[in-house]
Image (spheres, rainbow, N blue to C red):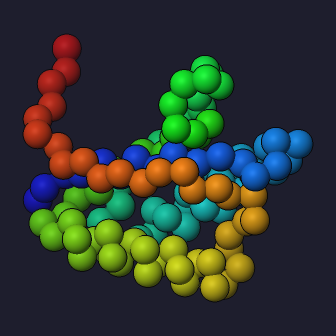
Amino acid sequence: MARWIVMGFTDCADPARDAEYNEWYDNIHVPDVLKAPGVMRATRYHNIDPEGGPGKYLSLLEIESDNIDQTIADLRAHLGRLQAAGRFTDLLVDVSFVVYRELGSQSR
């Protein structure tokens, strides 16, 4: 099974509500996303350099799939159902979404 990383860069639409945005993302959105087929792990990061990078926040989704196009289509459909069910926030600003295939891994 091939391994993939999906990088999602996001911002909060209202900096005054940043804590609310992070509460939603960590406690509602991430658990919801982990229910999508092929998504094995989700990790979030905060950009500490406001001048660098495409977004204030980075989410990494680790995916296992032999058909990444179908898995991404399924993920997008899953996200659409979540949004239709009212499980999204108006604070989410999607900046960028990128998919990478793992070539190898090393540890020390």
Q: Quadrant of the N terminus?
A: bottom left
Q: Position of residue 21 (x, y in %)?
A: 75, 51
Residue visible at 45% across and 69% down in the picture: 35
Q: Can residue 19 be seen at all in this image of the molecule?
A: no
Of residues 60 and 28, the one nearer the viewer is 60
Q: Position of residue 24 (x, y in %)?
A: 72, 56
- 24 up-or-down from 71: above or below: above
- 40 up-or-down from 44: above or below: below
Image quadrant assignment for residue 91: bottom right
Q: Can residue 98 be seen at all in this image of the molecule?
A: yes
Image quadrant assignment for residue 81: bottom right
Of residues 31 and 54, the one nearer the viewer is 54
Residue visible at 64% across and 50% down in the picture: 26
Image quadrant assignment for residue 15: top right
Of residues 33 and 95, the one nearer the viewer is 95
Looking at the rendered structure, the number of numbered marks drawn on it comes to 0
105 displayed left or right of 17: left
Residue visible at 21% across and 66% down in the picture: 68
Q: Position of residue 108 (x, y in %)?
A: 19, 14
Q: Position of residue 62 (x, y in %)?
A: 33, 50
